[in-house]
Amino acid sequence: MKKLTLFLSALLICASTTVGAFAYDPQEFSGKGSRAQYDKSIPAANQGAKLLHAGKYEEALRYYDKAIAIYPYDAGMHSNRASVLNHLSKTKESVVELNKAVQLEPTWADGYNNLADQLRISKDFSAAQSNCKKAIQLAPGDPLPVLTLAEIYIDMKKYPDAEQLISKAKRMPAAKNDQFIQKMIKVDLEKLSRIR
């Protein structure tokens, strides 16, 4: 069960990072801090992203550390560093990074969703629920935080509530053609059927 939890958590964080095709875009400068510092951090952040997606987590961590030391104001860099830490089973450190990410981007639903998932793994269900509900509030049409809340309820043994949320996520228009969401729904339903 722990491997499945770590797998789902890694999927959640990787699915919602800002890296996408392994490249930070110089045009996405947030206006915080120095533009020169941001530009200087991009090569290290891009290398970290490539290494993260290649499964070379220790190396990826070094590059994200370097990028964040140069430019600590990018929520995506902190979120991706959290993903690396998650892969290294450093959940507490991952939570710290995700808290930094949502402080930097307080309207970023994916940041709150990732934080909720890491708090779920830490068994801090109250904080997990709170952050997940914030993600749902910020992105009401996104099925991902709805499924994360379902997983929190599964871990809390609130199976009927979890089942309702999974059904809700299945009905959301954004879930229809999203293979990742469909896979999460399937995994969550299988998890529920094994438990019951």
Image (cartoon, rainbow, N blue to C red):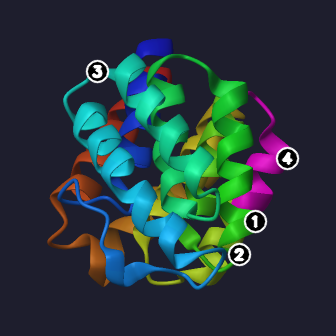
Q: How far, Cα to Cα, is label 3 from label 1?
A: 28 Å
> What amino acid is found at the position of numbered circle 2 in the picture?
Pro
The residue at the point 69 percent across, 68 percent down is 104
Asked whether residue 126 is drawn in magenta, I would say yes
Vertical placement of 49 versus 94: above or below? below
Vertical placement of 138 versus 5: above or below? below
Side of 127 relative to 109 (left or right): right
Vertical placement of 5 versus 13: above or below? above
Q: Secondary structure at mark 1?
A: helix
Q: Are marks 1 and 2 in contact (CB under 8 Å)?
A: yes
Q: Which mark is residue 103?
A: 1
Magenta span covers which residues? 122-131
First in sequence: mark 4 vs mark 3: 3
Q: Are marks 2 and 4 in contact (CB under 8 Å)?
A: no
Residue 121, position as x, y percentages in the image: 64, 29
Q: How far, Cα to Cα, is label 1 from label 2?
A: 5 Å
> What amino acid is found at the position of numbered circle 4 in the picture?
Ser
Q: Where is mark 2, residue-wise? A: 106
Q: How far, Cα to Cα, is label 1 from label 4?
A: 19 Å
First in sequence: mark 2 vs mark 4: 2
Q: Nearer the viewer, mark 1 or mark 4?
A: 1
- How many numbered marks does the figure carry? 4
Q: Where is mark 3, residue-wise? A: 56
The residue at the point 71 percent across, 71 percent down is 134
> What amino acid is found at the position of numbered circle 1 in the picture?
Gln
Q: Where is mark 4, residue-wise? A: 126
Q: Nearer the viewer, mark 2 or mark 4?
A: 2
Asked whether residue 103 is drawn in magenta, I would say no
The chief SS type of the magenta part is helix
> In front: 172, or 41?
41
